[in-house]
Image (cartoon, rainbow, N blue to C red):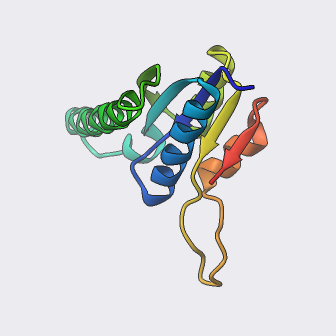
């Protein structure tokens, strides 16, 4: 049913739920798991000095690559084929672009927590991916 599943992650609790579910789905359908981390240049790219900005972005990218390695390692323990990539840009745009450029059949994303009213809500990146993706998005 799904040959390629994409799971973007930022390391948050919501994203971790999405990762766990994506790994389960990849195992169930014998799918290739694509793991993606996006350094949000719109948020982190506006520090005062250019040299300190680049150092800061590089540190976030390093942290993202470490997270990708952890997720891939967990998936590989279940004998899943994985690919992991760290990109820079606007997260929802990079996720949608990656999905369309890599023949992704399903994007799995975690919801980001609980609102003041106690009901689960979808994070802004997840919501933007849902609205702009031509690929089905499964929220966890």
| Image coords of residue 104 (percent x, y) | 66, 22
| Image coords of residue 113 (percent x, y) | 54, 67
Q: Quadrant of residue 76?
A: top left
Q: Where is the N terminus found, in terms of image quarters?
A: top right
Left or right, 62 with reference to 119? left
Q: Observer-nearest residue: 63 or 14?
A: 14
Please report the residue visible at 65 percent of the width from the left and 84 percent of the height from the top.
117
Q: Is residue 92 above or below residue 101?
A: below
Q: Observer-nearest residue: 84 or 45?
A: 84
Please report the residue visible at 26 percent of the width from the left and 39 percent of the height from the top.
63
Please report the residue visible at 32 percent of the width from the left and 39 percent of the height from the top.
67
Q: Quadrant of residue 79?
A: top left
Please report the residue visible at 45 percent of the width from the left and 51 percent of the height from the top.
16
How many labels were placed on the picture? 0
Q: Quadrant of residue 55?
A: top left
Left or right, 63 with reference to 95? left
| Image coords of residue 42 (percent x, y) | 48, 42
């Amino acid at each position: 049913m799904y040959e390629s599943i994409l799971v973007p992650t930022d390391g948050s609790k919501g994203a971790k739920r999405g990762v766990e579910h994506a790994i389960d789905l990849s195992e169930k359908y014998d799918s290739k798991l694509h793991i993606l981390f996006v350094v949000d240049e719109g948020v982190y790219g506006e520090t005062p000095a250019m040299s300190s900005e680049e150092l800061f972005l590089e540190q976030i990218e390093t942290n993202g690559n470490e997270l990708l390695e952890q997720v891939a390692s967990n998936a590989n323990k279940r004998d899943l084929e994985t690919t992991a990539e760290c990109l820079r840009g606007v997260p929802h745009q990079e996720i949608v672009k990656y999905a369309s450029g890599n023949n992704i059949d399903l994007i799995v994303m975690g919801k980001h927590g609980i609102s003041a009213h106690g009901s689960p809500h979808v994070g802004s990146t997840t919501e933007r991916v849902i609205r702009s993706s031509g690929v089905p998005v499964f929220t966890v």
